[in-house]
Amino acid sequence: MINSRGRKRATLPTMKQLFIECAIVGVIAGTVSTAEARTLECGTFKFPRCSGPDYQYDRKFKPKLGFGGFGGGGSCKATRTPVVFIHGNADRATNWDSGITGPIGNFEKPKNSVYDTFKAHGYKDCELFGITYLTKAERDAPQSNYHSPEKYKIIKGFIDAVKTYTGQTKVDVVTHSLGVSMTIASLTYYDAQNGGHEAWDSVRKFVNIAGGIRGLSSCLYTGYANPLVKTCGSENALNRYIFGFYPDTGTALGFNDWTGAEGPFSMRRAPMVDNSVEFYTLHAGEHDQIHCGTLQGIADCSKGALFLKSPNIKAQLNIGAGANAEQVDFNFKDWSPFVQMGGDADGIGHFKAKNNSGEIIYQMLNSDCTGLDCKGSYAGGPVIAD
């Protein structure tokens, strides 16, 4: 601009110019990159949930599936097998960064969340992914959630999106609670639909944390066809790929091939059917307030997350601690992960079996460990091999 005396007047740069100049300087200095990965952030943590946003994807990773998630990195190259985290009922992907509460008795309090444990061991953001497959309304009404092809499409599609984005042919899958059975059903469903084994062949290692693979003993209290508690339903008579957590009764009333002990759909037999995958289990046994919340089925509730023995099961570890779950009638109307009963109240139960076990999960995915050796550096509580 020229002033009245013919001299050029100094002008302030526009905000756009400042942004461009700062970006150029940042790239030259190596401190700013528009393709930099976005790390998962919990926000404020109040057991057992994070306050951070639902969507925390890197801008270049766009799975267009589900209702939130994390992962990706624009200029990042995956050199390890990518890890896909699948959350449980009433939960969401952001909570894989949940903080640690404790300590448990005289044991050490784990330092990091599951997500931060992997970052501390050198995993890059383009090697860690999570998907939220439940809507906000579904998360607020966990008693109504069950297994269905609608959810299978989200989970299988997300695994495929991670493979495409990273250029890897396999993923490691870490699952919790409803996410365990939902993922097993998803992979089984797509292999059955496509007449092959492509879905399960995409998995290198599978970690089951407190999954209801034998059904939930506490569902015996509600019945197999209670419209107010759909999550406890049996297998749908018209579509076998729709089912709830009712334990199989072996009769026409309450039958459930998925939670039963026999047949190709039996989730406890998944390692036998999918023998190219390495399987691991983490659970809280009788300290698990979801599995052991009622007097009904109390004798078997501590086994609810266990696979049947198979050579490709590398470890099944019980890390439960504290008080046993309260053996009272479970109030499914108020069922949510924010109800503290049993081990989670003063030790490790259904949710802390996930939150506190990052070091064990890391060891399972990054070694040839078996049995108690999969404990790794974990010192947060007692560990028993099943």
Image: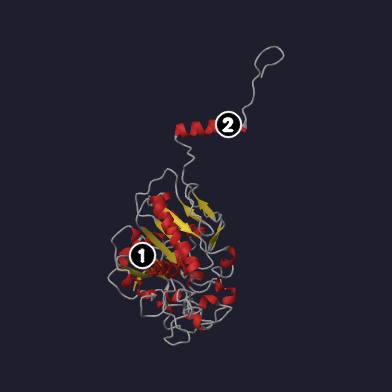
Instruction: Tell me the element at label 2.
Output: helix
Residue 246, above or below 82: below
Marks 1 and 2, how far apart in space? 51 Å
Quadrant of the rendered image containing residue 194: bottom left
- Residue pictured at 61% horizontal, 33% vertical: 15
Q: Is residue 110 visible?
A: no
Mark 1 = which residue?
200
In percent of width and height, residue 367 lies at: 30, 59
Task: Tell me: 32 left or right of 307.
Answer: right
In percent of width and height, residue 260 lies at: 40, 80
Instruction: Tell me the element at label 1.
Output: helix
Image quarter hosting the N terminus: top right
**Amino acid, disc 2:** Leu
**Amino acid, disc 1:** Trp
Q: Earlier in the sequence, mark 1 or mark 2?
A: 2
Give the residue furthest to the top.
5
In percent of width and height, residue 155 lies at: 45, 62
Q: Nearer the viewer, residue 162 or 31?
A: 162
- Residue pictured at 44% horizontal, 35% vertical: 30
At label 2, counting other C-alpha atoms closer than 10 Å, the crowd grade (few under 14, some 14-19, many 20 or more) is few
The disc label shown at residue 18, or none: 2
Query: Which mark is nearer the camera, 1 or 2?
Result: 1
The disc label shown at residue 262, or none: none
Q: Nearer the viewer, residue 250 or 314?
A: 250
